[in-house]
């Protein structure tokens, strides 16, 4: 048995690998961009680039794990676990999402951003496995949900008070009024 025969590990051409990865990256960039546009429109921290890159990186890691099962061996390895890299994506994105959460004054902010980062990574994982149509449908559902909840929050909670605080008739949060406004009310 010669050593050179054992070192030959390339069983797919670069073109085959490119044709396997390119559609996944393209769809992942599209999905991440769509969610990023919604977040950017709302003025949130994680916008277009962040969501597009998280989605495409998740898709690449997942697709890469599928390639590794067959790429490095001339015999299929039935014991190879392609979900190991996916598990690392989930925990790594959880760490990034935790960095988006911060406390200021009496509020915790960034929870929705962290959840969206995690959701976008999950969409990227689905794309990496080649599940395109379902992922695009789920993306549309996410965007509709985020947009409708945002409208509901503005109309219901900002008028009647709620988790975000109490608001006056002009839409200004009562606890956020400037001290000079309070003085003027007392003078009248």
Image (tube, grey):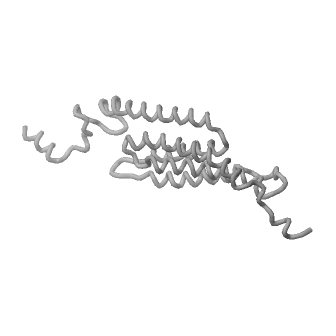
Q: Residue at x 69, y 52 (%)?
A: 15
Residue 149: x percent and y percent? 42, 32
Q: Quadrant of residue 160?
A: top left
Residue 182 as seen in the image, left or right of residue 168: left
Vertical arrangement, residue 1 with respect to residue 81, above or below: below
Q: Residue at x 57, y 42 (%)?
A: 27
Q: Extreme right residue here?
A: 1
Instruction: Name the one closer to the observer, 186 or 155.
Output: 155
Q: Extreme bottom residue here?
A: 3
Residue 178 as seen in the image, left or right of residue 20: left
Residue 78: x percent and y percent? 82, 50
Vertical arrangement, residue 23 with respect to residue 137, above or below: below
Q: Quadrant of the N terminus?
A: bottom right
Vertical arrangement, residue 147 with respect to residue 74, above or below: above
Q: Quadrant of the C terminus?
A: top left
Residue 106: x percent and y percent? 34, 48
Q: Residue at x 44, y 48 (%)?
A: 46
Q: Extreme front residue here?
A: 15
Q: Is residue 24 visible?
A: yes
Instruction: Name the one closer to the observer, 12 or 38.
Output: 12
Q: Residue at x 82, y 53 (%)?
A: 77
- Count up the numbered dots: 0
Instruction: Name the one closer to the observer, 27 or 135.
Output: 27
Residue 186: x percent and y percent? 11, 40
Vertical arrangement, residue 100 with respect to residue 161, above or below: below
Q: Quadrant of residue 163?
A: top left
Q: Is residue 86 visible?
A: no
């Amino acid at each position: 048995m010669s050593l050179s025969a054992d070192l030959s590990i390339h069983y797919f051409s670069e073109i085959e690998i490119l044709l396997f990865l390119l559609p996944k990256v393209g769809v992942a960039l599209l999905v991440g961009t769509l969610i990023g546009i919604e977040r950017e429109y709302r003025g949130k921290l994680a916008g277009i680039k962040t969501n597009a890159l998280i989605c495409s990186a998740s898709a690449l890691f997942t697709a890469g794990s599928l390639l590794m099962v067959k790429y490095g061996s001339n015999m299929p390895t039935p014991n190879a676990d392609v979900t190991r890299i996916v598990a690392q994506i989930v925990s790594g994105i959880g760490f990034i999402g935790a960095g988006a959460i911060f406390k200021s004054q009496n509020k915790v902010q960034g929870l929705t951003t962290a959840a969206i980062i995690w959701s976008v990574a999950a969409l990227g994982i689905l794309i990496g496995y080649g599940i395109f149509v379902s992922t695009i449908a789920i993306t549309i559902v996410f965007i509709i949900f985020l947009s409708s909840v945002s409208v509901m929050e503005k109309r219901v909670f900002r008028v009647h008070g709620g988790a975000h605080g109490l608001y006056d008739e002009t839409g200004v949060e009562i606890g956020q009024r400037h001290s000079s406004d309070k003085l003027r009310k007392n003078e009248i």
